[in-house]
Image (spheres, rainbow, N blue to C red):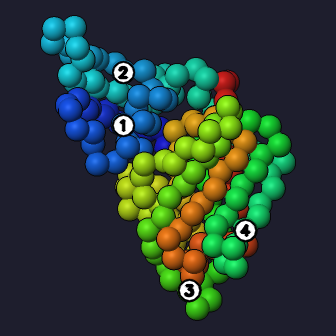
């Protein structure tokens, strides 16, 4: 997670922004530096993306271990299971490119602590902000989450011939207090 102190602003309306990741990141992980209210309702918020304005429970990003990985090209999904629940911030997957499709649509689903399957609203490839996309290469995939607490994440592409399913290595990162 990159925290360079940039300011971000979001106006609130009936419709949500096109990327839920962006607004969820701001709302879930940062404390706003300014909120403008009309009739007691916040219509504008400004955040500073730095460690000072990060909520204390999410100040530190660490690589998580005790990870079981299953699925793949044959199964058409990747299942990541942690031994203990964690607030997930990022998934990185190194994969091959042998006779497969580089990009497709798809979703990420996680299992809440009360065993409810929750489908994240953003598409697997097209709905994240520019920073996660800038970290990707033809054989390295990065997907950011906003601190969802879980023990299990499933990556479900629509195309079962997606290169991502030819994974070689998977890393998962979580958020913690300092």
For mark 3, give the secondary structure. Answer: loop
Quadrant of the rendered structure where residue 64 is?
top right
Q: Are marks 3 and 2 in contact (CB under 8 Å)?
A: no
> At which x and y percent is residue 88?
62, 41
Residue 71 is tagged as 4
Please state the horizontal and vertical placement of residue 116, each as a whole percent of the image. 62, 39
In this view, the mark in front (4 or 2) = 4
Q: Disc 3 or disc 2, which is closer to the eye?
A: 3
Q: CA distance from mark 3 to mark 2?
A: 43 Å
Which residue position is annotated with label 2? Answer: 32
- Residue that mark 1 sits on: 23
- Of residue 2 and residue 166, the one placed in the foreground of this image is 166
Mark 1 Cα shell of 10 Å, populated few (<14), some (14-19), many (≥20): some
* Residue mark closest to the camera, 4 vs 1: 4
Q: Earlier in the sequence, mark 4 or mark 3?
A: 4
Give whichever of discs 1 and 2 has the lower sequence position.
1
Residue 159 drawn at (x, y percent): 51, 76
Asked if residue 118 lies left or right of residue 68, the reply is left
For the residue carrying disc 4, how many other residues have a C-alpha within 10 Å: few (<14), some (14-19), or many (20+)?
some
Q: What kind of element bears circle 2?
A: strand
Gap between marks 1 and 3 measured at Cα? 33 Å
Determine whether label 4 and label 1 are within 8 Å by CB. no
Label 3 crowd (10 A; few <14 / some 14-19 / many >=20): some
In the rendered structure, find residue 100 and report the number of the disc placed on it: 3
Q: Is residue 48 above or below residue 69?
A: above
Measure the C-alpha gap from mark 4 to mark 3.
16 Å
């Amino acid at each position: 997670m990159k925290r360079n102190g940039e300011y971000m602003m979001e106006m609130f309306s009936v419709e949500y922004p096109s990327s839920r990741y962006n607004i969820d990141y701001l709302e879930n992980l940062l404390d706003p530096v300014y909120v403008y209210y009309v009739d007691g309702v916040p219509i504008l918020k400004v955040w500073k993306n730095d460690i000072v304005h990060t909520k204390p429970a999410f100040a530190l990003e660490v690589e998580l271990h005790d990870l079981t990985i299953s699925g793949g090209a044959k199964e058409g999904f990747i299942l990541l299971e942690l031994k203990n629940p964690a607030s997930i911030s990022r998934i990185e997957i190194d994969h091959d490119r042998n006779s497969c499709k580089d990009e497709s649509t798809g979703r990420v689903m996680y299992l809440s602590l009360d065993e409810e399957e929750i489908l994240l609203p953003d598409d697997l490839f097209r709905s994240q902000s520019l920073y996660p996309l800038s970290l990707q290469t033809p054989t390295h995939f990065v997907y950011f989450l906003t601190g969802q607490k879980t023990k299990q994440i499933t990556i479900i592409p629509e195309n079962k011939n997606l290169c991502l399913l030819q994974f070689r290595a998977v890393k998962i990162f979580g958020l913690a207090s300092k």
